[in-house]
Amino acid sequence: MPKNVTDFSSIFVKQPKPEKGKLLLAEPFMESPEFKRSVIMLTEHNEKGTMGFIINRKLNVTPSQAIDDFPEFDDELYYGGPVNSDQLFYLHTKPDLIEGGQEIIPGLFLGGDYTTLKNLIDIKKITPKDIRFFVGYSGWAAGQLKKELKDNSWIVLPGGVEYVKAKFNKNLWKDILKGLGGKYSIVADFPEDPTLN
């Protein structure tokens, strides 16, 4: 992390604690290619560690193009993070149709019966606004995220089902910060590479 990042720590008011359904926004100068300007929705946070999915990193393939024996589905696949990047994960809003999912926040669920899901897609009972598919996830070992938050690597913000239901927005990271107004708007306009400024 660049030395001057800590100079901006004073603009971050007391943040909410990380928990299921909250968002993590990468700090402006994060150098990690996996997480640069990423927006992550947390799906688990406890004493054992943290799990979430990058919701603003779209891949240029559909699930049916990337996965064998997957029904035609006209939606993009997302890069959820570097952990288990050979596995498919999904967040959805249809627990009444896809049984076995884990509730993240009211109205939003992770996973569920895969065979049922494929059948529902086949008969057009699941649409892109109901679900978002990811390859891989983002994970932190016990205490790791706490340390990164102390280092001002992330901003914790409220989340919501709408972030999964919304269409892809390549400017999501910037738009969320600008929407907060005030000093956050200044952060949103920092160039990705400060040496070019």
Image: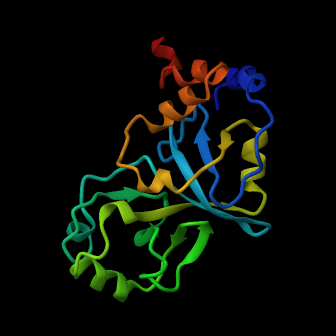
Residue at (35, 88) in percent of width and height: 115
Residue at (62, 46) in percent of width and height: 24
The x, y position of residue 118, in whole percent, is 30, 82
Q: Does the rendering let one see residue 70?
A: no
Q: Does the rendering let one see residue 32?
A: yes
Left or right of 100: which side holds 76?
Answer: left
Q: Indicate how the structure is coloured in the image.
A: rainbow
Residue at (76, 66) in percent of width and height: 46
Quadrant where the N terminus lies?
A: top right
Left or right of 64: which side holds 197?
Answer: right
Residue 90 position (above or below residue 161): below
Picture quarter containing residue 116? bottom left
Residue at (23, 75) in percent of width and height: 124
Left or right of 171: which side holds 52?
Answer: right
Can you name the residue that lies furthest to the top here? 197
The x, y position of residue 73, in whole percent, is 23, 68
Q: Of 108 and 191, which appears nearest the observer? A: 108
The x, y position of residue 170, in whole percent, is 37, 38
Picture quarter containing residue 90? bottom left
Residue 3 position (above or below residue 25): above
Residue 175 position (above or below residue 108): above
Q: Of 52 and 153, which appears nearest the observer? A: 52
The x, y position of residue 48, in whole percent, is 75, 69
Left or right of 88: which side holds 67?
Answer: left
Picture quarter containing residue 14? top right
Count of numbered circles in the view? 0
